[in-house]
Image (spheres, helix red, strand yellow):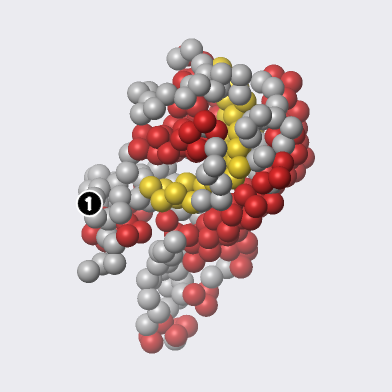
Amino acid sequence: MKLPIKIDFTGKTVVITGAGGVLCSYFAEAIAECGANVAVLDLRLDAAEAVAAKIRNNGGNARAYACNVLDRDSLTTAKKAIDSELGPCNILINGAGGNNPKGTTTKEYLFPEDLDAETTKDVITFFDLDPKGIEFVFNLNFLGTLLPTQVFARDMARTKDPLILNISSMNAFRPLTKIPAYSGAKAAVSNLTAWLAVHFAKVGIRCNAIAPGFFVTNQNHAMLKNPDGSLTPRSEKILAATPMGRFGEPEELIGTLLWLCDAGASGFVNGIVVPIDGGFSAYSGV
């Protein structure tokens, strides 16, 4: 990977949750190229190991760990292994997250005819949203950020230049139609980021977040692309609202990632959420 900027993280241990996914795997590779020891955490050990193996093949130091970010015992077990094999965590990147169809409506708007249950058997309206699905989305995104922070941050406070980097979303600024659970959960992540920045300030832990706009990942591929690779109607609406007129590339997150992780470059930056969205958040639609 060609890095936009080169930071020296030699001797630092960086823990990344959700690192088997598209975006966080790029984070892991970039951090490793800067000399860090990288702990690749994912619910799926095979996905984590594939990322760690790629890093090692490129000369970096990484280990894979199966970890459920909603299970404190799983997190504690991973932490013990990381402490022993890579050293105490200096930088925590909370990348685990996602959506669930049970927290998603079928239509963007509620129409009068949708109020008739007999004619909308195949339509999920706001009134049909499954509380369990919404709970899953909130837990995965919010608790999946809070619990790893509880497990790793206590020791981080004793290290040099510790940082927590959360992954929010443009949904936290401007909620997308159809996905109220995910939008609300990411807004909670942004709010938690600001809260943690204040709470941890006296022990030296900075906490910031990045809010990616629209990047094609495994999770959203079916929403953005048809089987033949053409754009879906939802994609066309997204790009029409993105002044740069395209999706982001994972590599375009790396410069901000490295800037926020390096105390020498951003040591007085604390409690912010950085949009990386091609102008989506700035565009009024007119």
Locate residue 153 relative to residue 2 in the image: left or right: right
The N terminus sits in image quarter: top left
Give me the residue at 75% from left, 39% from top: 154
The image position of residue 58, as x and y in percent, is: 45, 15
The residue indicated by pointer 1 is 245
The residue under the point 25% across, 44% down is: 229
Above or below residue 246? Residue 18 is: above
Q: Residue at x 52, y 47 (%)?
A: 209
Could you tell me residue 151's position as x and y percent?
Answer: 73, 40
Q: Provide the secondary structure element on which disc 1 rests.
A: loop
Where does residue 4 sit, x and y in percent of width and height? Answer: 36, 29
Q: Callout 1 environment at 10 Å: few (<14), some (14 to 19), or many (20+)? A: some
Q: Quadrant of residue 42?
A: top right
The residue under label 1 is which amino acid type?
A: Gly
Quadrant of the drawing holding the C terminus: bottom left
Q: Which residue is located at x 44 percent, y 61 percent?
A: 173
